[in-house]
Amino acid sequence: MTEAALGAAFTEVFGRAPEGGWAAPGRVNLIGEHTDYNDGFVMPFALPHTTRAAVARRDDGRLRLHSAATGIGAGGVVELDVARLAPGATEGWARYPAAVLWTLREAGHPVGGADIHYTSTVPVGGGLSSSAALQVVTALALTELYGVEPTRQELALLCQRSENVYVGAPVGVMDQIASACCTEGHALHLDVRSMAQRQVPFDLAAEGLRLLVVDTRVKHAHADGAYGELRAGCEAAAAALGLPALRDVAYGDLDAALAALPDDRLRRLTRHIVTENRRVEEVIALLDAGRTADIGPVLTAGHVSLRDDFRISCAELDVVVDTALAEGALGARMTGGGFGGSAIVLLEESAEERIGSAIDRALPQSRRFTTVPGPGAHRLG
């Protein structure tokens, strides 16, 4: 949707013109899964797919929210009292932007009401961070309109807090950082503990490569609550080892750490986190050396670890990965929280149609697209 069309839709809903339009992307995590809440390393990049918001301030203490997905007709606008926003008080998709406004105000920022119309091309439920895109675009628009000037990192941390406290989801910060801070043509190496960031060039086309995202379009019921259980398990493993976080287990000390843990589940969780941090470092070294094709086996090893140690893959994700590899892909793995969602496939440009068609046959309900790293959140126009 163009900026003009976004503004026209806002006017149709709210009967006045917006003050501006903003966009924030979803993300693909190249490598580094479930390491963010273990103080580890992650490496996401921004998708070209974005959530866009046309916004205008209000001076009557009301927050009015509308999504293109709900239609223009009666009942499509969610209206909230800014003064009455509180954790648990908002339901449905509107709780994400409401959470952002509440968090900004709780942090002392002089942000008030607004009319906001949203549209999005980020696949919902695909593990591509549609919720983070919604949060970040809301936060960027409100802070710019109300003259608040947080850094992009601060903006992302506020969005993470909004999801942790208001929505009640114990997520790490990777998704919000990716949406707010990624740059076009790069993957973002983030050290979650120090919050140090490095933009790593990731130019697939220059090497005749493609990255395919395959949305399985499934989400299994046991995904609900599993994230919190995994996080609690990792924290229990770190505590059993007397460490602040599993990030503090050196790769060379992994065997000794596993031997010190009391049960198999904690050992599996620990092995994934420690080896996944190592895989992030391996991918960075290969990209720095100009050996992009060689990251394929590292991606595949990450999938095996998520499948066998973290146990968050599912039959559909495994079908995509196994099919792609059987057809000659350089590497493939699930990406995101698990139990459904999306997989990524690294392949040579010449093999794209063959591998894509094989995936279509193996999992007909899936949808796929080729992607490149896009820009982070920004104002339109």
Image (cartoon, helix red, strand yellow):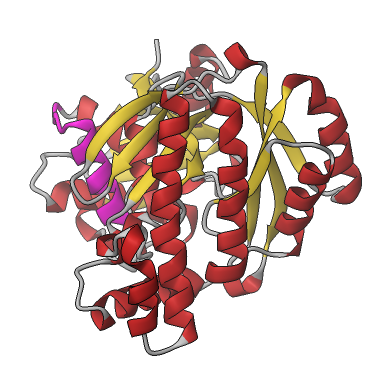
Q: Can you tell which quarter of the image residue 356 is in?
A: top right
Q: Look at the picture and state if 235 lies above or below 7.
A: below
Q: Residue 72 location, x and y as percent?
A: 59, 36
Q: Residue 139 location, x and y as percent?
A: 29, 38
Which quarter of the figure is the C terminus placed in?
Answer: top left
Foreground of the two, 179 or 207: 207
* Residue depicted at x 39% and y 56%: 95
* Residue depicted at x 44% and y 88%: 263
Q: Is residue 151 magenta?
A: yes
Q: Is residue 200 magenta?
A: no
Q: Can you tell which quarter of the image residue 111 is in?
A: top left
Foreground of the two, 202 or 143: 202
Q: Can you tell which quarter of the image residue 143 is in?
A: top left
- Type of secondary structure dominating the magenta stretch: helix
Q: What is the residue that sits farthest to the bottom in this orientation?
A: 262
* Residue depicted at x 38% and y 89%: 262
- Which span is picked out in magenta? 147-163
Q: Residue 257 location, x and y as percent?
A: 33, 75
**Looking at the image, can residue 51 be seen?**
no
* In this picture, residue 344 sits left or right of residue 110: right
Q: What is the residue that sits farthest to the right in this orientation?
A: 361
Foreground of the two, 38 or 272: 272
**Looking at the image, can residue 287 be seen?**
yes
Instruction: Report the number of numbered marks.
Output: 0
Foreground of the two, 156 or 373: 373
